[in-house]
Image (spheres, helix red, strand yellow):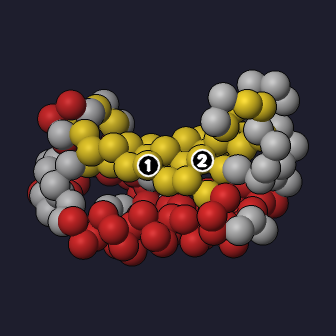
């Protein structure tokens, strides 16, 4: 359900920092939204020097950008909690100042997303969605994490 794209200047993050960021982004999303962790996808994209600009100039400061696409239907309070928590875990994982981390969230209607071959459920309908999966699909998801 959530897809998070973490953009960072090339070589800014070590493999351990990338793994920690991915794990923490997944954990925070699960804790705040209740969505199963096997739905969370985190992609780290390193931007080569000369391809990242801020204010129309090549990036000269520490900067990380997290763009999250999540299912629509979350409360304003949960979205705010998610924004701040994501900022904090990315900053901690990267050893960056909080002001260096930008986070954008984009809502997508569940009906506009397919994952694991199925249209996604509305927030709160995950258990019914899981209960209607073929056993082979459910076993696959259980192998990825909690279901």
Q: Please tell me which residue is depicted at 77% across the width and 31% down the height of the picture.
A: 58
Q: Please tell me which residue is depicted at 58% across the width and 72% down the height of the picture.
A: 88
Indicate the quadrant where residue 83 lies: bottom left
* Image coordinates for residue 57, horizontal then vertical, percent: 73, 31
Please state if 26 lies on the left or on the right of 136 as rendered: right
Q: Earlier in the sequence, mark 2 or mark 1?
A: 2
Please state if 13 lies on the left or on the right of 78 as rendered: right
Residue under circle 2? 65
Residue under circle 1? 104
* Foreground of the two, 20 or 127: 20
Indicate the quadrant where residue 9 lies: top right
- C-alpha distance separating marks 2 and 1: 8 Å
Q: Please tell me which residue is depicted at 33% across the width and 43% down the height of the picture.
A: 106
* Image coordinates for residue 33, horizontal then vertical, percent: 30, 67
* Image coordinates for residue 14, horizontal then vertical, percent: 85, 54
* Foreground of the two, 36 or 48: 48
User: Looking at the picture, does residue 9 appear above or below residue 102?
Assistant: above
* Foreground of the two, 22 or 75: 75
The disc placed on residue 76 is none
Q: Residues within 10 Å of mark 1 (few under 14, many from 20)?
A: few
Question: Can the viewer see residue 108?
Answer: yes
Indicate the quadrant where residue 49 lies: top right
């Amino acid at each position: 359900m959530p897809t998070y794209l973490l953009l960072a200047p090339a070589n800014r993050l070590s493999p351990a920092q990338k793994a920690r960021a991915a794990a923490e982004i997944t954990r925070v999303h699960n804790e705040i939204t209740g969505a199963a962790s096997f739905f969370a996808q985190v992609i780290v994209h390193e931007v080569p020097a000369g391809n990242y600009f801020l204010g129309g100039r090549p990036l000269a400061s520490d900067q990380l950008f997290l763009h999250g696409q999540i299912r629509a239907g979350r409360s304003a309070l949960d979205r705010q909690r998610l924004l701040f928590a994501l900022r904090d875990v990315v900053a901690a994982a990267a050893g960056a100042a909080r002001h260096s981390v930008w986070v954008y969230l984009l809502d997508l209607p569940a009906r506009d997303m397919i994952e694991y071959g199925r249209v996604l459920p509305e927030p709160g309908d995950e258990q019914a969605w899981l209960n209607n999966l073929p056993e082979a699909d459910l076993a696959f998801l259980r192998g990825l994490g909690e279901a």
